[in-house]
Protein backbone atom coordinates (compact mmCIF):
# COMPACT_ATOMS: atom_id res chain seq x y z
CA UNK A 1 0.00 0.00 0.00
CA UNK A 2 1.30 3.46 -0.86
CA UNK A 3 2.15 5.76 2.03
CA UNK A 4 -0.12 8.76 2.45
CA UNK A 5 1.08 11.85 0.63
CA UNK A 6 2.08 14.87 2.68
CA UNK A 7 -1.19 16.48 1.54
CA UNK A 8 -3.12 13.56 3.01
CA UNK A 9 -1.13 13.38 6.24
CA UNK A 10 -3.03 16.07 8.11
CA UNK A 11 -6.38 14.66 7.00
CA UNK A 12 -5.29 11.22 8.18
CA UNK A 13 -4.07 12.54 11.53
CA UNK A 14 -7.29 14.45 12.07
CA UNK A 15 -9.40 11.40 11.23
CA UNK A 16 -7.42 9.21 13.61
CA UNK A 17 -7.67 11.83 16.32
CA UNK A 18 -11.40 12.24 15.84
CA UNK A 19 -11.88 8.48 16.09
CA UNK A 20 -9.94 8.39 19.35
CA UNK A 21 -11.89 11.23 20.91
CA UNK A 22 -15.22 9.74 19.86
CA UNK A 23 -14.26 6.50 21.54
CA UNK A 24 -14.84 4.48 18.39
CA UNK A 25 -13.49 0.94 18.38
CA UNK A 26 -11.68 -0.01 15.20
CA UNK A 27 -13.07 -2.86 13.18
CA UNK A 28 -11.51 -6.16 14.15
CA UNK A 29 -9.75 -6.60 10.81
CA UNK A 30 -6.70 -8.50 12.06
CA UNK A 31 -8.21 -11.25 14.17
CA UNK A 32 -5.92 -14.31 14.22
CA UNK A 33 -2.85 -12.37 13.06
CA UNK A 34 0.20 -12.04 15.32
CA UNK A 35 2.46 -9.00 15.02
CA UNK A 36 5.81 -8.52 16.73
CA UNK A 37 6.77 -4.89 17.38
CA UNK A 38 10.47 -4.31 18.05
CA UNK A 39 10.99 -1.19 20.14
CA UNK A 40 8.69 0.48 22.67
CA UNK A 41 9.32 4.08 21.73
CA UNK A 42 6.38 6.15 20.57
CA UNK A 43 6.67 4.78 17.01
CA UNK A 44 6.44 1.20 18.24
CA UNK A 45 3.70 1.98 20.76
CA UNK A 46 1.70 3.86 18.12
CA UNK A 47 1.82 0.85 15.78
CA UNK A 48 1.11 -1.66 18.56
CA UNK A 49 -1.85 0.32 19.87
CA UNK A 50 -3.48 0.53 16.44
CA UNK A 51 -2.78 -3.10 15.58
CA UNK A 52 -4.14 -4.45 18.85
CA UNK A 53 -7.23 -2.28 18.55
CA UNK A 54 -7.70 -3.81 15.09
CA UNK A 55 -7.77 -7.30 16.61
CA UNK A 56 -4.19 -8.48 16.16
CA UNK A 57 -2.27 -10.36 18.81
CA UNK A 58 0.62 -8.00 19.51
CA UNK A 59 3.83 -8.51 21.46
CA UNK A 60 6.23 -5.60 21.95
CA UNK A 61 9.92 -6.37 22.53
CA UNK A 62 11.95 -3.63 24.24
CA UNK A 63 15.68 -3.89 24.95
CA UNK A 64 15.63 -1.42 27.83
CA UNK A 65 13.97 -1.54 31.22
CA UNK A 66 11.29 1.04 30.40
CA UNK A 67 8.98 2.13 27.60
CA UNK A 68 9.10 5.41 25.72
CA UNK A 69 12.41 5.25 23.87
CA UNK A 70 13.58 8.83 23.45
CA UNK A 71 10.62 10.01 25.49
CA UNK A 72 12.06 9.78 28.98
CA UNK A 73 11.05 12.04 31.85
CA UNK A 74 12.83 12.32 35.20
CA UNK A 75 10.85 13.90 38.05
CA UNK A 76 13.61 13.81 40.68
CA UNK A 77 14.42 17.54 40.42
CA UNK A 78 10.94 18.64 41.47
CA UNK A 79 10.08 19.56 37.86
CA UNK A 80 10.22 17.25 34.83
CA UNK A 81 13.57 16.86 33.13
CA UNK A 82 13.12 15.56 29.60
CA UNK A 83 16.06 13.40 28.62
CA UNK A 84 14.85 13.28 25.03
CA UNK A 85 11.71 14.76 23.49
CA UNK A 86 11.06 18.08 25.18
CA UNK A 87 8.70 20.04 22.95
CA UNK A 88 5.56 19.36 20.98
CA UNK A 89 6.57 21.01 17.72
CA UNK A 90 3.68 22.66 15.91
CA UNK A 91 0.92 21.79 18.38
CA UNK A 92 -1.81 23.18 16.17
CA UNK A 93 -4.62 21.43 14.37
CA UNK A 94 -3.67 18.01 13.02
CA UNK A 95 -0.66 17.25 15.23
CA UNK A 96 -1.40 13.79 16.68
CA UNK A 97 0.91 14.23 19.67
CA UNK A 98 -0.87 17.45 20.61
CA UNK A 99 -4.05 15.42 20.26
CA UNK A 100 -2.77 12.87 22.79
CA UNK A 101 -2.03 15.70 25.22
CA UNK A 102 -5.46 17.22 24.67
CA UNK A 103 -7.17 13.88 25.28
CA UNK A 104 -5.37 13.60 28.62
CA UNK A 105 -6.08 17.20 29.57
CA UNK A 106 -2.33 17.63 29.97
CA UNK A 107 -1.35 21.27 30.50
CA UNK A 108 1.05 22.83 28.01
CA UNK A 109 3.29 25.88 28.19
CA UNK A 110 4.46 28.02 25.28
CA UNK A 111 8.21 28.62 25.49
CA UNK A 112 8.52 32.12 24.10
CA UNK A 113 11.49 32.24 21.72
CA UNK A 114 11.38 36.03 21.85
CA UNK A 115 12.02 36.00 25.60
CA UNK A 116 15.75 35.69 25.05
CA UNK A 117 18.78 37.46 26.47
CA UNK A 118 22.05 36.82 24.66
CA UNK A 119 25.28 37.34 26.57
CA UNK A 120 28.89 37.31 25.52
CA UNK A 121 31.06 34.79 27.36
CA UNK A 122 32.13 37.47 29.87
CA UNK A 123 28.52 38.34 30.73
CA UNK A 124 28.21 41.48 28.62
CA UNK A 125 24.74 41.79 27.14
CA UNK A 126 24.79 41.55 23.36
CA UNK A 127 22.37 44.48 23.18
CA UNK A 128 19.29 45.06 21.07
CA UNK A 129 21.16 46.58 18.13
CA UNK A 130 23.38 43.53 17.70
CA UNK A 131 20.48 41.14 18.29
CA UNK A 132 18.40 42.89 15.63
CA UNK A 133 21.33 42.79 13.24
CA UNK A 134 21.60 39.05 13.87
CA UNK A 135 17.92 38.57 13.11
CA UNK A 136 18.40 40.47 9.85
CA UNK A 137 21.49 38.39 9.06
CA UNK A 138 19.52 35.18 9.61
CA UNK A 139 16.73 36.33 7.29
CA UNK A 140 19.28 37.38 4.68
CA UNK A 141 21.08 34.05 5.13
CA UNK A 142 17.90 32.09 4.39
CA UNK A 143 17.27 34.15 1.25
CA UNK A 144 20.88 33.84 0.11
CA UNK A 145 20.86 30.10 0.78
CA UNK A 146 18.02 29.48 -1.65
CA UNK A 147 19.52 31.85 -4.21
CA UNK A 148 22.89 30.09 -4.02
CA UNK A 149 21.65 26.49 -3.99
CA UNK A 150 21.98 24.43 -7.12
CA UNK A 151 18.79 22.51 -6.48
CA UNK A 152 18.07 19.46 -4.33
CA UNK A 153 21.06 17.64 -5.80
CA UNK A 154 23.48 20.28 -4.50
CA UNK A 155 26.05 18.19 -2.56
CA UNK A 156 27.33 20.99 -0.33
CA UNK A 157 27.01 21.08 3.43
CA UNK A 158 25.48 24.07 5.15
CA UNK A 159 28.94 25.16 6.29
CA UNK A 160 30.31 24.95 2.74
CA UNK A 161 27.39 26.91 1.35
CA UNK A 162 27.71 29.58 4.05
CA UNK A 163 31.41 29.85 3.23
CA UNK A 164 30.59 30.29 -0.45
CA UNK A 165 28.04 33.01 0.37
CA UNK A 166 30.38 34.91 2.68
CA UNK A 167 33.45 33.38 4.41
CA UNK A 168 33.25 35.97 7.18
CA UNK A 169 29.93 34.65 8.52
CA UNK A 170 31.43 31.64 10.30
CA UNK A 171 34.31 33.76 11.57
CA UNK A 172 31.96 36.13 13.41
CA UNK A 173 31.27 35.05 17.02
CA UNK A 174 27.71 36.38 17.03
CA UNK A 175 26.83 34.61 13.78
CA UNK A 176 28.50 31.41 14.95
CA UNK A 177 26.32 31.48 18.06
CA UNK A 178 23.16 32.14 16.05
CA UNK A 179 23.79 29.33 13.57
CA UNK A 180 24.56 26.91 16.37
CA UNK A 181 21.67 27.82 18.66
CA UNK A 182 19.12 28.07 15.86
CA UNK A 183 20.26 25.65 13.16
CA UNK A 184 22.47 23.03 14.81
CA UNK A 185 19.91 22.68 17.61
CA UNK A 186 17.10 22.13 15.14
CA UNK A 187 19.06 19.66 13.00
CA UNK A 188 20.97 17.88 15.75
CA UNK A 189 24.23 17.92 13.82
CA UNK A 190 27.17 20.17 12.86
CA UNK A 191 26.78 22.62 9.98
CA UNK A 192 29.67 20.81 8.31
CA UNK A 193 27.66 17.55 8.11
CA UNK A 194 24.17 18.73 7.13
CA UNK A 195 22.85 18.91 3.58
CA UNK A 196 22.30 22.54 2.59
CA UNK A 197 19.74 21.44 0.01
CA UNK A 198 17.58 19.45 2.43
CA UNK A 199 18.19 21.18 5.76
CA UNK A 200 15.01 23.24 5.70
CA UNK A 201 12.79 21.14 3.42
CA UNK A 202 10.83 19.20 6.05
CA UNK A 203 7.18 19.91 6.88
CA UNK A 204 5.61 21.30 10.05
CA UNK A 205 2.24 21.49 11.73
CA UNK A 206 1.00 24.97 12.67
CA UNK A 207 1.38 26.56 16.08
CA UNK A 208 4.07 27.71 18.50
CA UNK A 209 6.06 24.95 20.19
CA UNK A 210 5.02 23.94 23.70
CA UNK A 211 6.39 21.88 26.56
CA UNK A 212 4.47 19.65 28.96
CA UNK A 213 5.06 20.99 32.50
CA UNK A 214 3.79 17.73 34.04
CA UNK A 215 6.07 15.61 31.85
CA UNK A 216 6.11 14.20 28.34
CA UNK A 217 5.89 10.67 29.75
CA UNK A 218 2.21 11.20 30.55
CA UNK A 219 1.47 10.59 26.88
CA UNK A 220 2.76 7.02 26.98
CA UNK A 221 0.28 5.34 29.33
CA UNK A 222 -2.77 5.45 27.02
CA UNK A 223 -0.73 4.01 24.16
CA UNK A 224 0.73 1.21 26.28
CA UNK A 225 -2.48 0.30 28.11
CA UNK A 226 -3.18 -3.43 27.80
CA UNK A 227 -0.23 -4.16 25.50
CA UNK A 228 2.01 -7.17 26.06
CA UNK A 229 5.35 -5.37 26.47
CA UNK A 230 8.47 -7.41 27.24
CA UNK A 231 11.26 -5.19 28.55
CA UNK A 232 14.83 -6.45 28.77
CA UNK A 233 14.41 -8.21 25.41
CA UNK A 234 17.26 -7.03 23.18
CA UNK A 235 16.72 -8.11 19.59
CA UNK A 236 19.68 -9.30 17.53
CA UNK A 237 17.94 -11.05 14.64
CA UNK A 238 14.85 -10.47 12.49
CA UNK A 239 13.85 -13.13 9.95
CA UNK A 240 11.12 -12.11 7.50
CA UNK A 241 10.84 -14.99 5.04
CA UNK A 242 8.08 -17.58 5.18
CA UNK A 243 7.34 -16.52 8.76
CA UNK A 244 8.34 -13.59 10.93
CA UNK A 245 10.88 -14.63 13.55
CA UNK A 246 12.54 -12.28 16.04
CA UNK A 247 15.38 -13.49 18.23
CA UNK A 248 17.80 -12.38 20.91
CA UNK A 249 19.74 -13.70 23.91
CA UNK A 250 16.39 -14.37 25.61
CA UNK A 251 15.17 -16.75 22.87
CA UNK A 252 12.83 -16.18 19.92
CA UNK A 253 9.22 -15.42 19.05
CA UNK A 254 7.40 -16.02 15.78
CA UNK A 255 4.47 -14.30 14.16
CA UNK A 256 2.95 -13.12 10.92
CA UNK A 257 4.52 -9.65 10.71
CA UNK A 258 7.23 -7.53 12.30
CA UNK A 259 7.25 -3.78 12.86
CA UNK A 260 10.88 -2.75 13.34
CA UNK A 261 10.78 0.48 15.35
CA UNK A 262 14.43 0.46 16.41
CA UNK A 263 16.36 3.75 16.45
CA UNK A 264 18.38 4.59 13.35
CA UNK A 265 21.60 4.58 15.34
CA UNK A 266 21.07 0.94 16.29
CA UNK A 267 20.33 -0.01 12.68
CA UNK A 268 23.40 1.85 11.43
CA UNK A 269 25.60 0.02 13.96
CA UNK A 270 24.52 -3.34 12.55
CA UNK A 271 23.32 -4.54 15.94
CA UNK A 272 20.49 -6.48 14.27
CA UNK A 273 20.87 -9.07 11.50
CA UNK A 274 18.09 -9.33 8.91
CA UNK A 275 17.34 -12.60 7.12
CA UNK A 276 17.03 -12.26 4.21
CA UNK A 277 19.26 -9.18 4.09
CA UNK A 278 17.49 -5.90 3.45
CA UNK A 279 17.32 -4.90 -0.20
CA UNK A 280 19.77 -2.28 -1.45
CA UNK A 281 17.43 0.72 -1.14
CA UNK A 282 16.88 0.01 2.55
CA UNK A 283 20.56 -0.59 3.24
CA UNK A 284 21.42 2.65 1.43
CA UNK A 285 18.83 4.59 3.46
CA UNK A 286 20.07 3.26 6.78
CA UNK A 287 23.65 4.02 5.81
CA UNK A 288 22.96 7.37 4.16
CA UNK A 289 20.59 9.12 6.59
CA UNK A 290 22.48 10.82 9.40
CA UNK A 291 22.01 10.42 13.14
CA UNK A 292 23.05 13.30 15.36
CA UNK A 293 22.95 14.27 19.00
CA UNK A 294 22.17 17.18 21.31
CA UNK A 295 23.40 17.13 24.90
CA UNK A 296 21.34 18.44 27.79
CA UNK A 297 22.39 19.21 31.34
CA UNK A 298 19.98 20.29 34.07
CA UNK A 299 21.53 22.19 36.97
CA UNK A 300 19.41 22.84 40.05
CA UNK A 301 20.42 25.62 42.46
CA UNK A 302 19.30 26.81 45.89
CA UNK A 303 18.86 30.34 44.59
CA UNK A 304 18.34 31.80 41.14
CA UNK A 305 21.20 34.06 40.01
CA UNK A 306 19.50 34.88 36.71
CA UNK A 307 16.44 36.89 35.67
CA UNK A 308 13.64 34.46 36.50
CA UNK A 309 11.25 36.09 34.01
CA UNK A 310 13.48 35.51 30.96
CA UNK A 311 12.72 32.27 29.10
CA UNK A 312 16.05 31.66 27.39
CA UNK A 313 19.65 32.76 27.79
CA UNK A 314 22.08 32.55 24.92
CA UNK A 315 25.81 32.63 25.66
CA UNK A 316 28.38 33.24 22.92
CA UNK A 317 30.83 30.45 23.69
CA UNK A 318 33.75 28.72 22.06
CA UNK A 319 34.06 26.10 20.78
CA UNK A 320 30.87 26.64 18.79
CA UNK A 321 27.96 24.80 20.39
CA UNK A 322 29.41 24.60 23.91
CA UNK A 323 26.54 25.11 26.40
CA UNK A 324 25.39 28.13 24.42
CA UNK A 325 21.62 27.96 25.03
CA UNK A 326 19.83 27.77 28.38
CA UNK A 327 16.18 27.22 29.28
CA UNK A 328 14.96 28.84 32.51
CA UNK A 329 12.63 26.52 34.44
CA UNK A 330 11.37 29.33 36.64
CA UNK A 331 9.08 30.50 33.83
CA UNK A 332 6.94 27.35 34.14
CA UNK A 333 7.83 25.88 37.55
CA UNK A 334 8.95 26.93 41.03
CA UNK A 335 12.31 25.17 40.67
CA UNK A 336 15.62 27.03 40.30
CA UNK A 337 16.81 25.00 37.33
CA UNK A 338 18.75 25.99 34.24
CA UNK A 339 18.74 23.52 31.36
CA UNK A 340 21.87 23.88 29.25
CA UNK A 341 22.34 22.52 25.75
CA UNK A 342 25.31 21.67 23.57
CA UNK A 343 25.04 21.36 19.80
CA UNK A 344 26.93 20.53 16.64
CA UNK A 345 30.43 19.12 16.88
CA UNK A 346 30.54 19.87 20.61
CA UNK A 347 27.55 17.66 21.46
CA UNK A 348 29.36 14.32 20.96
CA UNK A 349 32.20 15.70 23.07
CA UNK A 350 29.74 16.62 25.83
CA UNK A 351 28.04 13.23 25.50
CA UNK A 352 31.33 11.50 26.26
CA UNK A 353 31.89 13.57 29.41
CA UNK A 354 30.98 12.14 32.78
CA UNK A 355 28.28 14.00 34.67
CA UNK A 356 30.91 15.62 36.90
CA UNK A 357 33.05 16.66 33.93
CA UNK A 358 30.06 18.12 32.10
CA UNK A 359 28.94 19.94 35.26
CA UNK A 360 32.34 21.57 35.62
CA UNK A 361 32.37 22.45 31.92
CA UNK A 362 28.88 23.97 32.02
CA UNK A 363 29.57 25.86 35.26
CA UNK A 364 32.62 27.49 33.68
CA UNK A 365 30.27 28.98 31.10
CA UNK A 366 27.70 30.11 33.68
CA UNK A 367 30.28 31.44 36.14
CA UNK A 368 31.81 33.69 33.49
CA UNK A 369 28.48 34.87 32.07
CA UNK A 370 26.72 35.47 35.39
CA UNK A 371 29.72 36.45 37.54
CA UNK A 372 29.47 33.40 39.75
CA UNK A 373 26.90 30.64 39.58
CA UNK A 374 27.53 28.74 42.78
CA UNK A 375 27.34 24.98 43.19
CA UNK A 376 24.29 23.08 41.94
CA UNK A 377 22.39 20.90 44.39
CA UNK A 378 21.43 18.34 41.74
CA UNK A 379 22.47 17.53 38.18
CA UNK A 380 21.09 15.39 35.35
CA UNK A 381 22.86 14.94 31.99
CA UNK A 382 22.09 13.16 28.74
CA UNK A 383 24.38 11.16 26.45
CA UNK A 384 22.27 9.75 23.61
CA UNK A 385 25.14 9.10 21.22
CA UNK A 386 26.97 6.85 23.70
CA UNK A 387 23.90 4.89 24.79
CA UNK A 388 24.09 1.50 23.00
CA UNK A 389 20.29 1.24 22.89
CA UNK A 390 20.02 4.46 20.83
CA UNK A 391 23.41 5.61 19.48
CA UNK A 392 22.09 9.09 18.72
CA UNK A 393 19.31 11.57 19.40
CA UNK A 394 17.56 12.16 16.08
CA UNK A 395 18.11 11.90 12.35
CA UNK A 396 19.19 14.56 9.85
CA UNK A 397 19.93 14.81 6.10
CA UNK A 398 23.64 14.38 5.45
CA UNK A 399 25.44 16.57 2.91
CA UNK A 400 25.22 14.86 -0.46
CA UNK A 401 22.10 12.89 0.46
CA UNK A 402 19.00 12.91 -1.71
CA UNK A 403 15.37 12.86 -0.69
CA UNK A 404 15.22 9.50 -2.46
CA UNK A 405 16.87 7.82 0.52
CA UNK A 406 13.64 8.15 2.50
CA UNK A 407 11.58 6.67 -0.34
CA UNK A 408 12.83 3.22 0.65
CA UNK A 409 10.62 3.42 3.72
CA UNK A 410 7.53 4.28 1.68
CA UNK A 411 6.97 0.56 1.06
CA UNK A 412 7.41 -2.42 3.40
CA UNK A 413 10.80 -4.14 3.38
CA UNK A 414 8.96 -7.39 2.62
CA UNK A 415 5.55 -8.94 3.02
CA UNK A 416 6.50 -9.67 6.64
CA UNK A 417 8.56 -6.64 7.65
CA UNK A 418 7.83 -2.93 7.88
CA UNK A 419 9.84 -0.16 9.54
CA UNK A 420 8.73 2.72 11.77
CA UNK A 421 10.54 5.56 13.51
CA UNK A 422 11.21 9.26 13.08
CA UNK A 423 13.97 8.48 10.58
CA UNK A 424 11.53 6.79 8.17
CA UNK A 425 9.70 10.01 7.25
CA UNK A 426 11.54 12.88 5.61
CA UNK A 427 8.70 15.33 6.08
CA UNK A 428 8.56 14.89 9.87
CA UNK A 429 11.95 13.45 10.77
CA UNK A 430 13.45 14.32 14.16
CA UNK A 431 10.02 14.87 15.74
CA UNK A 432 7.78 12.96 18.10
CA UNK A 433 4.80 13.41 15.80
CA UNK A 434 6.85 12.00 12.94
CA UNK A 435 7.63 8.91 15.00
CA UNK A 436 3.98 8.55 16.02
CA UNK A 437 2.70 8.91 12.46
CA UNK A 438 5.26 6.39 11.18
CA UNK A 439 3.83 3.83 13.61
CA UNK A 440 0.36 4.52 12.26
CA UNK A 441 1.57 4.08 8.68
CA UNK A 442 3.32 0.81 9.58
CA UNK A 443 0.13 -0.54 11.15
CA UNK A 444 -1.88 0.60 8.13
CA UNK A 445 0.36 -1.41 5.79
CA UNK A 446 -0.26 -4.55 7.85
CA UNK A 447 -4.00 -3.89 7.97
CA UNK A 448 -4.22 -3.31 4.22
CA UNK A 449 -1.15 -4.76 2.47
Image (cartoon, grey):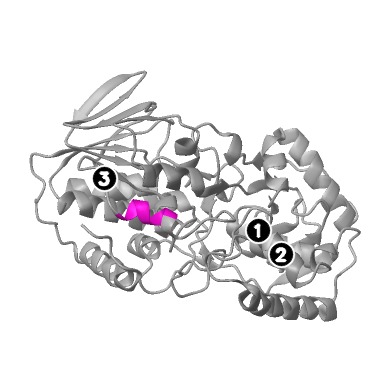
Label 1 environment density (alpha carbons within 10 Å; few <14, some 14–19, many ≥20): many
Which region shows up in magenta? 405-410
Disc 2, SS: helix
Residue 48 circle label: 3
Identify the mark nearer the N-term, 1 or 2.
2
* Residue 311 relative to residue 43: left or right: right
Magenta residue check for 99:
no
Image point (42%, 73%), residue name: 92
Judging by the rendered image, the residue that carries numbered circle 1 is 184
In front: label 3 or label 2: 2
Q: Say whether marks 1 and 2 touch (CB < 8 Å).
A: yes
Pinpoint residue 258: horizontal percent, then vertical percent: 25, 38
Identify the mark nearer the N-term, 3 or 1.
3
Label 3 environment density (alpha carbons within 10 Å; few <14, some 14–19, many ≥20): many
Main secondary-structure element of the magenta-colored stretch? helix
Judging by the rendered image, the residue that carries numbered circle 2 is 179
Q: Quadrant of the N terminus?
A: bottom left
- The residues bearing labels 3 and 1 have C-alpha atoms spaced at a distance of 33 Å
Q: Out of 424 and 380, give the one closest to the viewer.
A: 424
The image shows residue 142, relative to residue 304, as above or below, that is below
Amino acid sequence: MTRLSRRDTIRFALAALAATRAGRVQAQTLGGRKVIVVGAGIAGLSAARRLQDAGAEVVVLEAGDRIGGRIRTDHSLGAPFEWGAGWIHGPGRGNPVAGLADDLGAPTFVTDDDSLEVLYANGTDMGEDVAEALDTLYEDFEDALYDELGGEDDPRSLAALIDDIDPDILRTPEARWMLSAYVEFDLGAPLEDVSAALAFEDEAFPGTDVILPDGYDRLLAPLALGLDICTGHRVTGIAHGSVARVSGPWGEVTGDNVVCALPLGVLKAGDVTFDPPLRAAYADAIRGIGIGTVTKIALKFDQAFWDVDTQYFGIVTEPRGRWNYWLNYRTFSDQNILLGLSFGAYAPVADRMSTSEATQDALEVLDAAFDGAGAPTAVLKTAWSTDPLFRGAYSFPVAGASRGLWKAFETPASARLVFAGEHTTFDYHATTHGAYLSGQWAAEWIEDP
